[in-house]
Amino acid sequence: MHLVCSDLEGIFLPEIWIKFAEKTGIQELRLTTRDISDYDVLMKHRLKILKDRGLKLPDIQAVIAAMDPHEGALGFLEWIRSVTQVLVVSDTFVEFAGPLMKKLGYPTLLCNTLTVAADGTISDYRLRQTDGKRKVAEAMRGLNYRVIGVGDSYNDISMLTAADHGILYRPPDNVRREYPSFPVATGFAELKAMIATILRNGG
């Protein structure tokens, strides 16, 4: 039996922090795990900017509420569910993801949480577990699933490596160059074809 473990942002949704950067005009917030591989460094950088600018959780949630999934994302998720199982494994936060999960038909999401004060100030973040994406892939393989990992950034590489099959979806050139062993899908049609081939071959 197969199971797809997929990243969220960059696959099914636009990058939340990039959308927030566009709204606020703060270019430093455009940095994602496509640019900085160390997630803790990236998050501390983001939280410092929020603190310095007086930006709070409701400011980010207002931008998220206006976001929509990538074109074709919902149909692709519906197709996956018709042929196998899927887990969305993300470094996003429960406090961000709620409205977006509704737009995606409520797939199962494993992600992190924020530490938020009563006034909406984000003081810290809490990982569900360290290197959680890799551990999800390993845990599912331990339950005798054949895991297909889908991701686009540095923080997905350990999950793709731990999976039986790892696929990069529309990765930036730097990630693609550094990890040439992973096949690359440039759109949902190509990703669907790759997954269908794996399922058909039973590998």
Image (cartoon, rainbow, N blue to C red):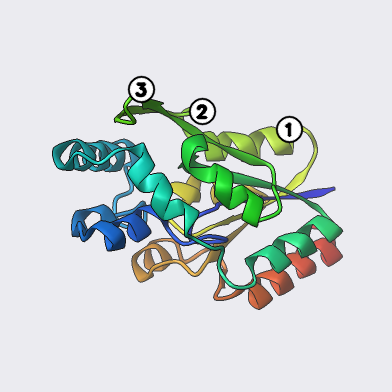
Q: Which label sits on residue 127?
A: none
SS under mark 3 = loop
Residue 118 vertical position relative to residue 63 in the rendered view, above or below: above
The image position of residue 81, as x and y in percent, is: 80, 56
**Image-based side of 191 in relation to 91, left or right:** right
Crowdedness of circle 1 by 10 Å Cα count: few (<14), some, many (20+)? few
1 or 2: tag closer to the N-terminus = 2
Disc 1 marks which amino acid?
Gly
Residue, far top = 118
Question: Which residue is denoted by mark 3 in the rendering?
Answer: 118
Residue 84 vertical position relative to residue 71 in the rendered view, above or below: above
Q: Which label sits on residue 142?
A: 1
The image position of residue 186, as x and y in percent, is: 55, 76
Q: Quadrant of residue 48?
A: top left
Disc 2 marks which amino acid?
Arg
Q: Are marks 1 and 2 in contact (CB under 8 Å)?
A: no
Question: Which residue is denoted by mark 2 in the rendering?
Answer: 128
Residue displayed at 49% across by 50% down? 156
